[in-house]
Image: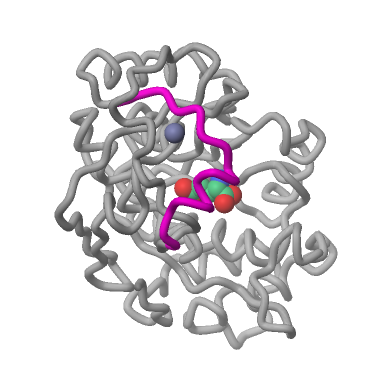
């Protein structure tokens, strides 16, 4: 099978150490298999993303020696494809419009794996789609996948998440739909990303099944925490990584991933370090962080 991997950052801030580790893991997994490594800028939420951050992220990847294959894909330019996927689901009555506010859902829903469970209030109201949020109908029963590091992960989507949003009231497409459409269209065979997205994976597997596209192999790496035990992110004010520290930070990333570190000082360029790490890449050594 042809290996196609990808790194898919959201340009809501500069690259920080947590996103560097995800980039490094997906890069090494692809290079170790002689595969293709794509970069996709996930700027579908135009209210949170900035073009300047996308440029900074791409510059940082280059400065760290993480050279991608082909052209960078921007989600903000792919709205027509998301619209087509949504239309395909709508035509089979798998979606419906929802007018509930966050507040109403929080008040009437149970708390689930990823916030309040949508209680299905609008399921049979047959509201018109334009101008409203669009949700996909979920079904009872477990959906599972086997993560290459974390093992078997299952969710009962209807019970644990509820019917989830594919298109927001403001007209923007949700990450869950965009990522599935893009991974399928780009022929992504292997997804390697942070374990903060483990809980989203079942929603993506479900959409893949509805759209009749293949489910890639998944590998979720442990999330990087700061000293206060919070996930590194823009919200927790994770500092941007500095190219001057590229070699030091690459080694720190290998260490976080449980990978061996080179000893000889001839590994003093990013290219030499990444080449060493790809030759010694061992997914089985990545620490586990169990899914719920
Ligand atoms: N854009 C997502 C993020 O930065 C990652 C999506 C993915 O790898 O599936 O958190
Ligand atoms: Zn509703």
Residue 114: give x, y in percent of width and height. 46, 58
Name the foreground residue: 226 vs 126: 126
Q: Across the whole image, how many numbered discs are drawn on residues?
A: 0
Q: Is residue 261 left or right of residue 152?
A: right
Q: Is residue 148 left or right of residue 69?
A: left
Residue 197: give x, y in percent of width and height. 46, 58
Residue 31 visible in rendering: no
Residue 45: give x, y in percent of width and height. 63, 33
Q: Where, by quadrant of the figure, is residue 111 drawn? A: bottom left
Name the foreground residue: 75 vs 268: 75
Q: Is residue 243 left or right of residue 140?
A: right
Q: Residue at x 62, y 85 (%)?
A: 264
Taking the image in four quarters, ligand 2 sits in the one at top left
Rendered position, 141 above or below 170: below
Q: Residue furthest bottom?
A: 263
Q: Residue furthest left?
A: 141
Q: Where, by quadrant of the figure, is residue 32 drawn? A: bottom left
Q: Is residue 196 left or right of residue 90?
A: right
Rendered position, 263 above or below 48: below
Q: Which residues are magenta?
A: 95-111
Magenta span contains residue 178: no
Rendered position, 142 above or below 76: below
Residue 23: give x, y in percent of width and height. 56, 56
Q: Quadrant of the C terminus?
A: bottom left
Name the foreground residue: 178 vs 113: 113
Q: Quadrant of the N terminus?
A: top left
The colour scheme is: one colour
Residue 12 visible in rendering: yes
Q: Residue at x 59, y 30 (%)?
A: 44
């Amino acid at each position: 099978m042809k290996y196609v991997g990808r790194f898919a950052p959201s340009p809501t801030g500069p690259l920080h150490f947590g996103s560097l580790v995800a980039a490094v893991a997906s890069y090494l997994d692809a290079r170790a298999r002689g595969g293709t490594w794509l970069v996709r800028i996930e700027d579908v939420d135009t209210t949170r993303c900035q073009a300047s951050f996308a440029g900074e992220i791409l510059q940082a990847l280059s400065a760290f020696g993480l050279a991608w294959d082909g052209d960078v894909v921007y989600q903000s330019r792919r709205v027509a494809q998301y619209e087509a996927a949504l239309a395909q689901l709508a035509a089979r009555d798998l979606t419906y419009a929802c007018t509930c506010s966050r507040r109403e859902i929080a008040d009437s829903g149970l708390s689930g794996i990823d916030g309040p469970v949508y209680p299905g209030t609008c399921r049979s109201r047959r509201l018109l789609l334009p101008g409203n949020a669009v949700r996909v109908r979920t079904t009872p029963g477990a959906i599972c996948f086997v993560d290459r590091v974390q093992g078997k992960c299952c969710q009962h989507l209807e019970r644990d998440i509820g019917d989830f949003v594919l298109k927001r009231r403001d007209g923007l497409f949700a990450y869950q739909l965009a990522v599935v459409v893009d991974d399928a269209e780009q022929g992504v065979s292997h997804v390697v990303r942070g374990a903060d997205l483990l809980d989203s994976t079942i929603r993506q597997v479900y959409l893949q099944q509805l759209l009749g596209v293949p489910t890639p192999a998944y590998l979720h790496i442990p999330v990087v925490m700061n000293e206060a035990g919070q996930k590194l992110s823009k919200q927790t004010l994770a500092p941007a990584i500095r190219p001057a520290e590229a070699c030091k930070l690459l080694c720190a990333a290998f260490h976080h991933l449980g990978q061996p570190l080179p000893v000889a000082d001839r590994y003093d360029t990013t290219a030499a370090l990444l080449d060493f790490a790809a030759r010694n890449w061992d997914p089985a050594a990545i620490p586990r962080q169990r899914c719920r």
